[in-house]
Image (spheres, coloured by chain):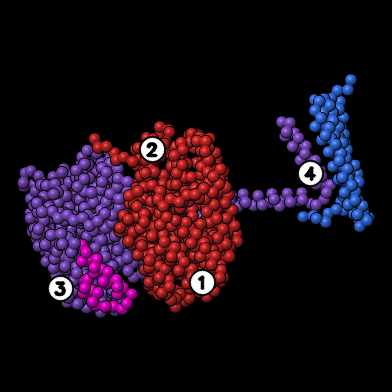
Amino acid sequence: MITLTHYMVLSGILFSIGMLGVIRRKNLLMLFFSTEIMLNAVNLGFVAVSKYIGDLSGQMFAFFIIAVAASEVAVGLGLLVLWYKRKQTIDLDSLQSMKG
Amino acid sequence: MDSILTLLIFFPFIAGMFGFMIDQKSIRAYGISVAFIEFALSLVLWFGFDSQNPGFQFIEQFPLIPQYGISYFLGVDGISLFLVILSTFMTLIALIGLTIEKDVKNLIISILFLEMTMVGVFVSLDVIIFYVFWELSLVPMLYIIGAWGAKLRIYAAIKFFLYTFAGSLIMLVGILYMAYLYYQATGVWSFAIPDWQLLVVPFHIQLWLFAAFFIGFAIKVPMFPFHTWLPYAHGQAPTIGSVILAAVLLKMGTYGFVRFSLPMFPDASIYFITPIAVIAIIMVIYTAMIAYAQEDMKQVIAYSSISHMGIIIIGTFAMNAEGITGSIFLMLSHGIVSGALFMLVGNIYDRRHTKLMSEFGGLAKVMPKYATIFGIMLMASVGLPLTIGFVGEFLSLIGFYKVSPTMTFLAGTGIILGAVYMLSLYKKSFFGELTNEKNKNLKDLNKMELASLIPLVLLVAYLGIYPKPVLNPIDNSVKNMIELMEKKSITKEAKELIKKANSIEEAK
Amino acid sequence: MEKYVYLTLFAPLAGSLFAAMFGMSKKNLITGIVTSALLFVSLFSSLMLLGYVDEEHIVKVNLFDWISAGNFDVSFGFIADQVSVIMMVTVTTVSALVHVYSIGYMDHDEGFNRFFSYLSAFVFSMLVLVMSDNFLGLFIGWEGVGLCSWLLIGFWYYKKDLPREIYPAISPSWAANEAFIMNRIADLGMLIGLFLIYWNVGSLNYDVVFKNIPNVDISIVVLIGIFLFIGAMGKSAQFPLHTWLADAMEGPTPVSALIHAATMVTAGVYLVVRANEVFSLIPNVGMFIASLGAFVAVFAATMALVNNDLKKIIAYSTLSQLGYMFVAAGLGAYWVALFHLMTHAFFKSLLFLGAGNVMHAMNDELNIKKMGGLYSKMKWTAILMIIASLALAGIYPFAGFFSKDKILEVAFSEHAYILWFMLWIGAGLTAFYSFRLIMLVFFGEERYKRFGFHPHEAYAFMLWAMAPLGVLAVISGFFEHSFKEYVTAILPDYEAHIEPHIVGYVLIALTLTMALSGILFAVYKYSRGGFSKKWEETWIYKLLFNQYYIPQLYEKFITKPYAELSKIAWKDIDLKIVDSTVDFIATTLYDAGDKSRVIQSGNLSKMLRWMAIGLIVLLIAAII
C-alpha cells in the first residue's frame, strides 16, 4: 500500500535533488532543470495531500504551478538563448556585471 | 489668540521658505526680523497666559489619524511656556550675533527651521507630534554642524546625529508600547500626553518604559556616560550652533524627564532616584574636573554645560516643588548663561581664529567691555546670588536635600569645582600680562556684538533679582504635577517619598 | 525711619553704579568724591538709626519677594536692630574713611574709577550681609563681598605670576582666585546649614528660625551649628581655610584695610553672633569654636613673629584677632565678640592705612628689613600706627585693652583655663610682633637709603582720613558699658563672674604685664639691631617663616593632584574609555557591514547558495 508518507518522502527527495542542483550547478540550463524538479516536487506534494484530505484546491494549485512554470521556462529559455548568442557561454559565473 | 501656538510653530518655517527668495545681502536683516516677530509672538503668549491656572492653556486639537487617536494637539503650561520663550529669545540673540558670511542664507533658513522644531517640541501635547519635532530638530543641526563647522565637522555632526537618533529610537519603542498599554486599559487609542499622564501603569512595566524613555532623554541631556558627543558637537559647531545647542536642544532632554518620566512613571522614577542621582553627581564632579583640564575655551564651557545639567537632573528628581521648579528655572538660566558664554567665545574666535587659552592672557587690558561681560556671565555660571544662575541652583539643591543630604552635598561640590574651572579660565585668558603680540591690537566688542550680549546681561541681572514672574507659573504647574504623581503612584515607597519630600519636618 | 534704612543700604550702591559708568574711561576725580560723599550719607543715616533703635523701635523693611517655590519663600527683607546697627555704623565709618583715603592712595592708578566702583559695591554687599533679616539675604551679601573681594584682590590683574621659592607662583589674580575658591568651599558648608534650617523650620527668616529652633531635635541643631560655622570659617579665614588671607594682601592696601581687616573677614563672627540663639543651644559646638579660635589666635600670631612682609604681618595679626573674637562668641559672650569686632575694625584699619602710607613712601616695597628710621620722614603716619599698635597690643587706655581683656576674662570665668592661657600667650606675641613692625619700619638704622628709596609723607587729607580712626582707636573702649547695654537688648547678657574680685584685677594686671613685656622686649631687641643671623637658621624660624608649610602642603596634596586627576579624567577616562566605547560600537557596526558586503558579490550561484541556506534556516525555524 502506498501511503501519503511515501509520496511525501518522494517529494522531499525530489526537492532535495533540485535544491542540490541549484546550489552546485553552474550551467544555466541545468539550473532551469533543477528548479523544474523542485517545482514538480512541490506539485507532487500538493496533489498527494489534496487526494489524501479530499480537497481539490491542492490539485488546482498544482495546475497553476505547472502553468506558471511553463511560461517561466518559455521566457527564461528565450533570455538564455539571447545570452548565449551574445556571450557564447551559459556559465553562471559569467553573469557578474551587476557585482556590487 | 486661539491658534497662536500653531502660528508660533509654523511662522518661522513659512518665513524660512520665503527666505529662499530673499537676496543674499538682505537675508540677515530678514532673519533677524523673523526671529524678532517670533519672539514678540511668544511674549504675546506669555501675556495671554493665566499664571494662576496650572493646567494646559491655548489648547488646539484636531484629529489627524482618528483610528489611532493621533491628533494635532498643542498646549502650554507653566513648565513649557518659558522654554518656548527661551527658544525664540535665544534664536533671536544668536541671529543678531551671527558673524558667518559663507552661505549665510542657507544657515539662516536652517536656523529658522530649527526654531520651528524647538517650539514644536515644547508645545506638542501629542506624543507623535512631539516625536516628529524631536527628530526633525536633528536635521537642521546636523546641517549646521556639518556645513559650517571646524575641521572635524563631519565626524562631529554624524556622531551627534546617530547617537541622539539611536537614543530616540529606543524611546519610540517605549512610546508605541505605552500607546498599546493605553489601548489595552481603555479600549481607545490615544497619544495625548494629558491622557497618558492619567494612566496608571503596573510597576514592573513602568520600570521598562522608564528605561526606554530614559535612554532617549539621557543621550539628549547628555548624561554620563552618554555625553561624549557633546564636546565634539560644541567643539566643531559654529558659534550659532553651539549657542542653540547648549541653550535649547539640551533642555529637550530634561524637559522630557519632567513631562514624561515623572508624571507617567512616578513609581519607577522614585525607584531609580538613587542610580540617577549617582549619575548626576558623576556628571557634576567628573565633568567639572575635565573642564578644568581643558586647553580650549569652548571645551571648558561645553563640559561645564554637562556639569550644570547634572544639577538640573538632581533638581528634577527631588520630587518636590522646590527642586523641580528650581530645575526648570535652572534650565532657563543655563540656557541664557551658556548661550552667552558660547557667544563670547565666538567673539574672540572671530578675532583671533583660535580658542586656545594659552594664546590669550591679559585680554582684560585690551578688551575691557568684553572682559566685563564675560565676567558677569562667569559669575552667573558659578551661581552667584542675584544672578540668574543662583536661583535655580539653590532651589534644585535645597529640593534634593530632603531626598538625600549626602548626595546633595556631593552635588553641591559643583559650586566649588565650577568656580575652580571658570576662574582658572578667566585668569588664563583675561588676567596676567599681555604677552602675545597678536592680542595687542584686538578690538573691543562692536555694536552688533553688544546688541546681542547686553540683553542677556540685563536678563541675567533681572531674573536673578526678581525671578518671581517666571517662578510663579512654573511653580503652579509643578505643584499640580506633583499632586498628580502622588495620587497615581502605586507603590508605598513612592507615596511616602513624595509626601516626605514635600513636607517640612514637624517640630517636636 | 525706613528711609534711613534704604539710604544706608542704597547710597553705596548708587555710588558704585555711578563710578561704574566711568569704569572704562580715564581717571576722574569725581568718582572718588561722589562715592565718598554717598558713603558719608550712608554713615550719617546709620548713625541716625543708631540713635533711633532701641527695644521698642526696631526698623524692618520688606522690599519685595525674591524666591518662592513650593513652600519656600524668601524676600528681600532688611532689619535695623541693635546688632545690625552696630555693624552698620562700624562698616560705614571705616568704609567712608577708607574711601577718602583711597582718593589719595589710588591717585596715580589708571583704574581709579573702577576701584571706587568695586569698593562701593563691596560696602553695599557688606551692608546687605549685616542688614538682611533672613539667612538667604545674608548669603547674598556673603557671596557679594566674596565677589568684590575677588575683584579687589585681583584689582591689578595685569600683573604676571611671580614665582616664589617654595610657594606656588603668586599674582593678584592668583590670590583673588584662591580667596574666591576657598570661600566657596566654606560656602557649601553654609548652604548645607541653610538647607537644614529650611527643612526643619520651614523658613529662613531670623524671627521664625530663632523662635522655632528650640523645638528642633538637638542633633539637628548641632549639625546646623557646625555647618554655619564652616561657612564662618571660610569668610573669617579660620584654620584650615586661612591661607587665602595672607595672599589676599596682593590687593591694594585700602582694600586690605577695609575688607581683609575691618569688615568682610569679621562676617563669620557676625554670623555666629547673629545666630546666637542657635549656638547657645549647643555649648559643645561653642566650645569647639572657642578652642579653634584660641588655636588660631596663637597660631597666626606665631607666623606674624618672623614675617618680613609689612602687610602680611598685619594680616596674620587680623587672623589672630579673629581667633579672639571666636573665643568670645564660642563661649557665649556674644556682645564681647561684637565689641572686639568693632574696636578691632577701627585700629586694624588704621594700622593698614598706615602701612599703605609706608608703602607709598617706599614705592610699594613691602619688606620691612629694607625700611627703618622712617619716623623722621613720616611722623604722623608713625604716630597713628603706634596708636593702632598700642590698641592692638591691648594697652590701657586704648580700645584694644577693653575688648581684648574682656575676652580673657570670659575665658577665665568659663573655667576654660587652657584657652585663657593661650590667649594670654597670644597677647604677649601680639604686642611683640606689633612693635617689631613699628621698630623695624620707623626706628633704628635708615636701611632704606641703601636701597635708594626716597620716602615722603602721604597727602595731608589721607592723614586726616586716618585721624578719626586714630581717635576711635583711643576712645572707643570707654563706651564699653553703653555698648553692652545697647546690644544686650537682643543679645544674651554676659557678665564675667570671677570671684573673688581681686582675682579679676590680678588677671588684668597679668595680661597688661604680658603685653607690656612683649612691647618692651621688641623695643629693646630691635633698638639693638634685632636678632642674630643664627636665629634665622633654626628650624623653628623656618617653620614659622614658611607658615608651617601649610601653603606648600595644599599645593602638593590638593592643587597639584587635582590638576593631575583632571588630566587623567579627561585624557584617559573620557577620551580613552567612555568615548572609545561609543566609537567602538559605531566602528563595529560599520566594520560588520563592510565585512558582510562581500556576500553581495553578484555571483548568481553564490547567491543561490545563500538562498538555499536561508530557506533551510527558515524551515528549521518554522519546525522549531
How far apart marks 2 and 1 lie (CA) works out to: 51 Å
Q: Is mark 3 on a helix, strand or loop?
A: helix
Q: What residue type is labelled 2?
A: Glu
Check whether the beta carbons of the residues at disc 2 and disc 4 lie within 8 A of each other: no
The residue that mark 2 highlights is B486
Q: Residue drawn at (21%, 52%), measured in percent from left and top?
A: C133
How far apart marks 3 and 4 lie (CA) works out to: 102 Å
How far apart marks 1 and 4 lie (CA) works out to: 56 Å
How far apart marks 2 and 4 lie (CA) works out to: 57 Å
Marks 2/4 same chain = no
Q: Residue drawn at (35%, 55%), measured in percent from left and top?
A: B470
Asked if residue C451 is positioned above or below residue B269 in the image, the reply reads: below
Q: Is mark 2 on a helix, strand or loop?
A: helix
Marks 3/4 same chain = yes
The residue that mark 3 highlights is C464
Q: Which of marks 2 and 4 is in front?
A: 2
Q: Is mark 4 on a helix, strand or loop?
A: helix
What is the crowding at mark 4: few (fewer than 14 residues within 10 Å), some, or many (at least 20)?
some
**C25 drawn magenta:** yes
The residue that mark 4 highlights is C610
The residue that mark 1 highlights is B27
Q: Chain A takes which shade in the image?
A: blue
- Image quadrant assignment for residue B492: top left
Q: x%, y% of residue C478? A: 8, 59
Specify whether C68 is left or right of B220: left
Marks 2/1 same chain = yes
Q: What residue type is labelled 1?
A: Ile
Q: Residue drawn at (83%, 54%), measured in percent from left and top?
A: A96
The front one of C425 and A94 is: A94
Tag 1, which chain? B
